[in-house]
Image (tube, helix red, strand yellow):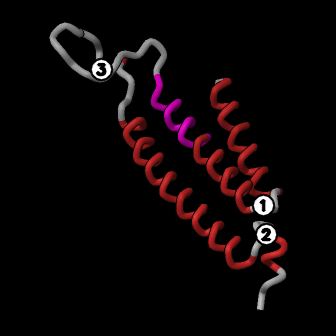
Amino acid sequence: MTEYFLCWILFCVGLYCVLTKRNLIKIIIGLGIMEYAVNLFFILLGYKKDGVFPILSKTLETKPEMMVDPLPQALILTSIVIGLATTCLLVSLAMHIYEKYGTYDVRELRKLKG
C-alpha cells in the first residue's frame, strides 16, 4: 500500500510542477514525472508478492495464479516509447518557441496574443 501512496505523491509533484511553473522546460519535466508515476503505478498493479515469472517449462511446476501478470509490463514498454516521442515533440516545440520569441516564460507568450 505504501508503494501506491508514493506513486500518488510522485504524480502530485509532477502535477504541481505543471500547474505552478512558468517555464516551458519545467512544465515538460513535470509532464515526464507524471508519466513515470503512472507507469510505475501500472507496473505495481501487475506485481504479486512471491510470484514467479510467467514462462512455463517442464522443470517449473507451479500454479498459474502464482505467476506475475506480463501484460502491464508489455503495455508500459509501449507507453515508454510513446512518452519519449511526446517528450521529444514538446522539447522541439519549446525550442522553436524560444527561437521565435526569445523566452520560455508562459506569461510572456500570453502577452503576444493578437
The segment highlighted magenta reads: 37-47
Q: Quadrant of residue 109?
A: bottom right
Label 2 or label 3, whichever comes before in sequence order: 3
Q: Residue at x 60, y 69 (%)?
A: 93
> In the rendering, which numbered label is found on residue 64?
3
Q: Earlier in the sequence, mark 2 or mark 1?
A: 1
Disc 2 to disc 1: CB gap under 8 Å: yes
Q: Nearer the viewer, mark 3 or mark 1?
A: 1
Residue at (44% x, 12% y) in the render? 50
- Residue indicated by mark 2: 106
**Sequence-first tag of 3 and 1:** 1
Amino acid at dot 1: Asn
* Real-space CA distance between mark 2 and mark 3, rounded to the nearest whole angstrom: 52 Å
Residue at screen point 69% across, 78% down: 100
Q: Amino acid at mark 3?
A: Pro
Q: Is residue 16 magenta?
A: no
Quadrant in which the C terminus is drawn: bottom right
For disc 1, the marked residue is: 23
For mark 3, does the 10 Å Cα neighbourhood hold few (<14), some (14 to 19), or many (20 or more) residues? few
Q: Is residue 96 left or right of residue 52?
A: right
Give left or right: position of 36 versus 81. Answer: right
Say which amino acid is labelled 2: Val
